Image: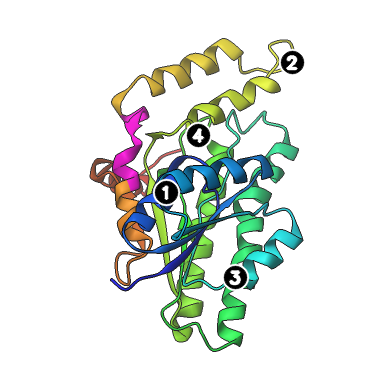
Amino acid sequence: MSKKTILVTGAATGFGKGAAIGMARNGHDVIATAHVASQVTPLREEVEKLGLADRIKVYRLDLSDPYDIRQAVGLDFDVLWNNAGMGEAGPVWEIPVDLVRRNFEVNVFLPLTLTQGVVQKWVREGKSQGKKVVFTSSMGGLFTPANWGTYVSTKHALESIAEALQQELAAYGVKIQTINPGAYYTGYNETMADNPFRWLDDDKNFTKRADLRKGFDDFFATPEGKMDAEEMIDRMIEIVPADTGKFRNVVPKVIEDMLKNHQLAAWENQI
């Protein structure tokens, strides 16, 4: 594997932060971007303490800010890793539609805006050969559990965008991958599960708060609902800079097998 320069969105916490540090330790140069300005200095200080300031440069990248987007597109890197995202949970038949729109804006439209700017620059400048775009999708990009439909529908959309990009950009030498984590414990899913309770009202909604909370708590209490994030980070450190590999990368294997069985069963699903 050759040395890469990798731009990571959503690198202030969770998978993005862990993998950014790991890839830098493996000899790659990393542009670690944080959505919130107040996250930039603490991340820079942590990078300095780790002795990685020569490998990791930290920028703010608020994907909703066109000037941040323009700055990011102007940087020089080999791999764009669209890792940033957010999630809205709760019953699809009752969730406020403005929250659905916002989830698609953050998880689909804004990463697509950044990706278009980056790949068009690569192609325009004749520097697209060997470049790569990676999307952090989800196990939820390949199936839809009840009460997670809004979030996972954004990941279904990313799967389609990535598959189209792989075909469209093949002639230009740009590689496309998705990473599909299971329910690893980073705090991301747990925070997402809190979101419905800011709008769910027992006096107005059919879905009761206590029932939804119990469903989430029961899931997070299972081994599959709270897996060790280090396993996923270790795989991301390998996948993101790699010159070759699978288009779709589901981790762990037990989740890959579950998703394959689910997709086969879908053909026999009855109304």
Residue 182 at what x, y percent from top left? 36, 40
Where disc 4 sits, the SS reads helix
Where disc 1 sits, the SS reads loop
CA gap between label 1 and label 4 equals: 19 Å
The disc placed on residue 142 is 1
Q: Report if residue 121 is visible in the image.
A: yes
The disc placed on residue 8 is none
Question: Mark 2 highlights which residue?
Answer: 204
User: The disc labelled 2 sits on which kind of residue?
Assistant: Lys
User: The disc labelled 3 sits on which kind of residue?
Assistant: Leu
- Range covered by the magenta-colored residues: 224-233
Residue 87 at what x, y percent from top left? 58, 38
Label 2 or label 4, whichever lies nearer to me, is: 4
Please tell me which of labels 4 and 3 falls first in the chain.
3
Question: Mark 4 highlights which residue?
Answer: 188
In the image shown, does 31 or 263 lie closer to the viewer? Answer: 31
Residue 212 placement: quadrant: top right
In the rendered image, which quarter contains the N terminus? bottom left
Query: Which residue corresponds to the image point at 72% horizontal and 53% vertical from the top-left?
Result: 64
The disc placed on residue 75 is 3
Query: Which residue corresponds to the image point at 60% horizontal and 14% vertical from the top-left?
Result: 209
Residue 93 placement: quadrant: top right
Label 1 or label 3, whichever lies nearer to me, is: 3
User: The disc labelled 1 sits on which kind of residue?
Assistant: Leu
CA gap between label 1 and label 2 equals: 32 Å
CA gap between label 3 and label 2 equals: 49 Å
Give yes or no for contact between labels 1 and 3 (Cβ–Cβ under 8 Å): no
